[in-house]
Every structure is written in C-alpha cells, then in structure tokens.
Image (tube, rainbow, N blue to C red):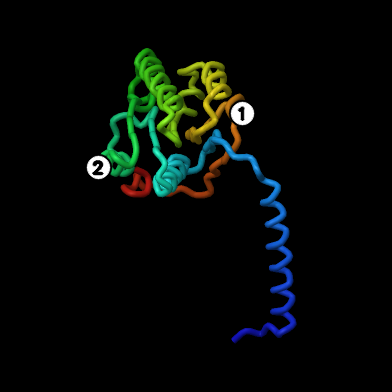
Amino acid sequence: MTTETPEDFARHNARSKRIAAARERMQARRTLERGLLIVHTGNGKGKSSSAFGMAIRSIGWGMKVAILQYVKGKWETGERNFFEAYPDLATFEVMGEGFTWDTQDRELDIAAARAAWERSKEMILDPGIEFVILDELNIVLRDDTLPIAEIVAFLKDRPLTKHICITGRGAKPELLEIADLVTDFTEVKHPYNAGFKAQKGVEF
C-alpha cells in the first residue's frame, strides 16, 4: 500500500508536466536531419551487437541495410547465420581474414582490408542503401592496416543521405573528431575473465 498523499501525487504530476513541456521545447529546437556517422568503441562487449540492433530497427522502417565485416573472418556467428538466411533483409558480407594473431600474415591482412574498404565505399556511395555498418573497421585502423587519413577524407566527403556505423575498440582520434555520435562501451565485468568460454548467442 502506498504511503504517498494526494499532495505528493499532485506535486509529482505538476513536475511531470513541467518536464514534458521542457522536452517539447527542446525537441522543437532540434531541426537538423541527415545521415549520421556513428562510432562504437571501447573495451566493453556489445559494440557490434548494438550496431546490429540498429540494423534491425532500420529494417523495421523499410530501410535498405548493408553490413560488411572486416575482421571476423570465416567465423560462424548467429548474426551471419541470420542475415544469410534472410538475404532480402540486408546485404551481409564477410571480407576479413580473421584477427592478426590468426592470419599471422601482414601482407594478407592489408590486402583483405583494402578489398573490404573498396567494397565499403561502393556501399556508402550506393543511393539505394540507407544504413551501412562497417564492423570492426576500428581494429583495422588501430593497427594501421589502412591509412586513417584516407578513410577520414572519404567519410568527410560522404553522401549525407545515409547513416554509417563503425565498430571496434581503439577508435582513432581522427575518426572520433568527425563522428556525430560516439559511444564508448566500458567493461565492468566479463565472464571470460572468470574462465568461461565464448557463449553461443551471447558472444557469437
């Protein structure tokens, strides 16, 4: 049973009305609308997962989505299985050769990254695509597998008709500077540190 009085309810309702009015005024001042450059970085889990969530949200609005994975290589993942099973929902391409400690071949890593970037540019320039995810591009840039100056120059001059989300830890300052939305995913606790292996449906 509540201990609040009628006066408490009245104060709460009045405060809610003030907040609603302030939010309406704030929303009225936000009139810009264009494609956003979004960066998910940080050491915490969920950067790619969050991007895939936005992909599903976009698909729900009937938007055309393209996803390109730079690093995951030939891993079997739940998201890959899903999008490959429903190719009409989104373009999903895996162009990485795996992590550098897997490939142990710098020349191969550079060639794969270059091919993936050229394909990324095609996706970004395609007028039929409205949302592009470049998964783990930050890893490639962090390792200087692709030149950050080239990527930044292209993104600065990109068509502003679509959203682009770039994921991966260690995002370069040059990329953060031009981004519209940056989220730093912070690890608080992770089962891997307690001896758990990667869990299907959670990690991949």
Q: Residue at x 60, y 35 (%)?
A: 180
Residue 57, given in percent of the width and then of the height, sits at 44, 48
**Please, is residue 101 above or below residue 81 in the view?**
above
Q: Residue at x 39, y 34 (%)?
A: 66
Q: Residue at x 68, y 57 (%)?
A: 24
Look at the numbered disc 1 and give the secondary structure of its residue. helix
The quarter in which the N terminus is drawn is bottom right
Q: Is residue 33 visible?
A: yes
The quarter in which the C terminus is drawn is top left
The residue labelled by disc 2 is: 85
Look at the numbered disc 2 and give the secondary structure of its residue. helix
Quarter holding residue 106: top left
Contact? badges 2 and 1 (CB < 8 Å): no
In this orientation, which residue lies closer to the viewer: 120 or 76?
Answer: 120
180 vs 133, left or right, is right
Cα separation between marks 2 and 1: 35 Å
In this orientation, which residue lies closer to the viewer: 195 or 81?
Answer: 81
**Please, is residue 139 above or below residue 42 in the view?**
above
The residue labelled by disc 1 is: 178
Q: Is residue 194 visible?
A: no
Residue 97, given in percent of the width and then of the height, sits at 33, 24
